[in-house]
Amino acid sequence: MLAKPFIKWVGGKGQLLEEIRKKYPSKIEKYCEPFVGGGAVLFDVLSRYHPETVLINDINKELINTYTQIKNNCSEMIDLKQKFFL
């Protein structure tokens, strides 16, 4: 399954991915994203390289909590999304 950003974010990089990809190294084993936002680059790197270690951060605590809940309670988050957003 291809993971894509689940939220639009001000300053998102989705439209710039083609240019950003040109800067990727040939191999990524560890990935650190200090300002994850909507995660366009994060999800692109995950789908292309499958790094062993991934660290994400953002100043927005609610956003990081959302990513944490997706990581730890994915099925429950999908159920909530279907209940409230479809």
Image (cartoon, grey):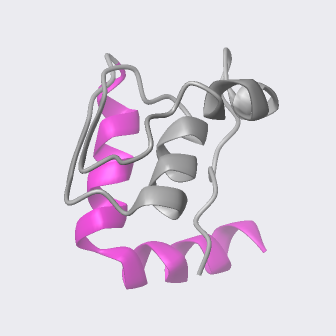
Instruction: Reply yes or no: does residue 85 show up in magenta.
Output: yes
What x and y, as percent, mark residue 56? 28, 36
The quadrant holding residue 23 is top right
Residue drawn at x 30%, y 60% is 69
Q: Dividing the image into 4 quarters, which one contains the N terminus? A: bottom right
In the image, residue 40 lies at what x, y percent?
60, 40
**Front residue (pair 45, 83):** 45
Tell me what residue is drawn at x 62 percent, y 50 percent: 5
Tag count: 0
Front residue (pair 27, 37): 27
Q: In the visual, does 33 lie left or right of 14?
A: left
Q: Residue 25 magenta-drawn? A: no
Q: Does 70 sit above or below residue 12?
A: below
Classify residue 83 as left or right of residue 86: left
Task: In the rendered view, tell whether residue 54 sits above or below residue 23.
Answer: below
Q: At x 29% / y 56%, what residue is drawn? A: 51
Query: Which portion, as a residue range, is magenta?
Result: 60-86
Residue 81 at x, y percent in the picture: 60, 71
Q: In which quadrant of the rendered image does the C terminus lie?
A: bottom right
Which of the pair 40/18 is nearer the observer?
Answer: 18
Compared to 24, does 26 lie above or below? below
Residue 69 position (above or below residue 76): above
Q: Main secondary structure of the magenta part?
A: helix
Front-lying residue, 74 or 14: 14
Q: Which residue is drawn at 36% across and 50% down?
A: 67
Tell me residue 34's x, y (percent). 31, 21
- Position of 78 with respect to 4 (left or right) is left
User: Is 30 on the left or on the right of 21, as rendered?
Assistant: left
